[in-house]
Amino acid sequence: MTLKSIARKNAVHVMLFYSGGCNGCDIEVVNAMLSPRYDLEQYKVMLTWNPREADVLLVPGVVTWQMLEPLKKIYAMIPDPKAVVAVGACAVNGNVYKNLVGDIGVNEEIFAPVETVIPVDVKIPGCPPRPEDIIMGAVKGLPKLMGAP
């Protein structure tokens, strides 16, 4: 057993990457992660801004063209195994931005769903999703981190 696997059993580091959209899902993620009501830190789920120590990448909203390359770079910096969670209807299927998305799923401005840019392990629908759903979605990504198929 490696030091990394032991550390992963003791704490999960979640990175939030705001890629574009209305900011509603972003607010709900921060509410779920940082508010005293849900207090995920008591379960050793920590919010981090360093991709090199992240285990789970949360992506709320669509991906704008300005954030396309930074998202790909951050995804590449996160060590394996990693889980990607698409948060909200825009990240899952484009939602209100569908009319801006071209026939093949992308155009020059909006890339939706997020899985057209990076692989997604867990999808959390909702506009915006409830904090409880976001927490459950992040938990669904944990088996991949622990080496389960």
Image (cartoon, helix red, strand yellow):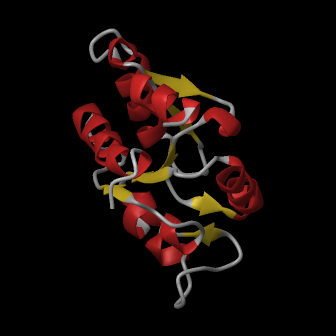
Vertical arrangement, residue 83 with respect to residue 138, above or below: below
Q: Residue 102's image quarter?
A: bottom right
Vertical arrangement, residue 85 with respect to residue 65, above or below: above
In-image side of 92 versus 100 (left or right): left
Find residue 86 and report its horizontal and vertical position in percent: 43, 54
In-image side of 5 versus 70 (left or right): left
Closest to the observer: 138 or 70?
138
- Point out the image quarter for the C terminus: bottom left
The residue located at (25%, 40%) in the rendering is: 136
Find residue 144 and report its horizontal and vertical position in percent: 39, 52
Closest to the observer: 39 or 90?
39
The residue located at (45%, 59%) in the rendering is: 91
The residue located at (35%, 56%) in the rendering is: 122
The residue located at (40%, 19%) in the rendering is: 44
In-image side of 84 versus 40 (left or right): right
Find residue 5 and report its horizontal and vertical position in percent: 49, 36
In-image side of 104 versus 128 (left or right): right
Find residue 2 and report its horizontal and vertical position in percent: 54, 36
So how many labels did they put on this image?
Answer: 0
Furthest-front residue in this view:
1
Vertical arrangement, residue 37 with respect to residue 51, above or below: above
